[in-house]
Image (cartoon, rainbow, N blue to C red):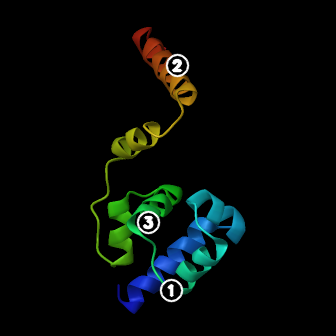
Amino acid sequence: MNLEAKQRLGILVRKTRSDRSLREFARLVGVAPTTIQGWENGDYIPEIDNLAKIAALAGLTLEELIAYVENREVIEPKAVDRIVHQIRKLPISEVAIIVKVGADRLASVALGS
């Protein structure tokens, strides 16, 4: 990974960490806080499984994260594809809420409301 890609990755990690402490974000990813700091500073790069975790925390696919880091353009998925992707990660209790809202919406359209 070249210097520019490391810098872009560091920016993305910092942005994804947001106002979380290094320790809190490290716990989410499953690494040491010094590891997060090293990624942010561009000292070293995450393993692929950690890149996937960072992508998920950033709301990106791994492909989108890599394209961003490599400064390549990615075709944006349709909004519905992004929503479906997010729903697949939700606990079943939250999916049930979404299904209920969807059913209510379909019922109101069927009744002409």
Which is more N-terminal, label 1 or label 3?
A: 1
Q: Does 41 sit left or right of 108 as displayed?
A: right
User: Height in image: 75 above or below 2?
Assistant: above
Crowd class of label 3 (few under 14; some 14 to 19; many from 20; radius 10 Å): some
Q: Does 17 sit left or right of 57 as displayed?
A: right
Q: Does 46 sit left or right of 79 as displayed?
A: right
Q: CA distance from mark 2 to mark 1?
A: 45 Å
Q: Specify the label residue 51 is tagged with.
A: 3
The residue located at (38%, 76%) in the rendering is 69
Residue denoted by label 1: 42
The residue located at (47%, 40%) in the rendering is 89
- The spot of residue 49 in percent (x, y) is 42, 61
Q: Specify the label residue 88 is tagged with.
A: none
The residue located at (35%, 70%) in the rendering is 66
Q: CA distance from mark 3 to mark 2?
A: 34 Å
Mark 3: amino acid: Leu
- Helix, strand or loop at label 1? It is loop
- Helix, strand or loop at label 3? It is helix
Residue denoted by label 2: 100
**Farthest residue, direction top:** 111
On the image, which quarter does residue 45 sit in? bottom left
- The spot of residue 52 in percent (x, y) is 42, 60
Specify the quadrant that holds the N terminus: bottom left
- The spot of residue 68 in percent (x, y) is 38, 72
Which is more N-terminal, label 2 or label 3?
A: 3
Mark 1: amino acid: Gly
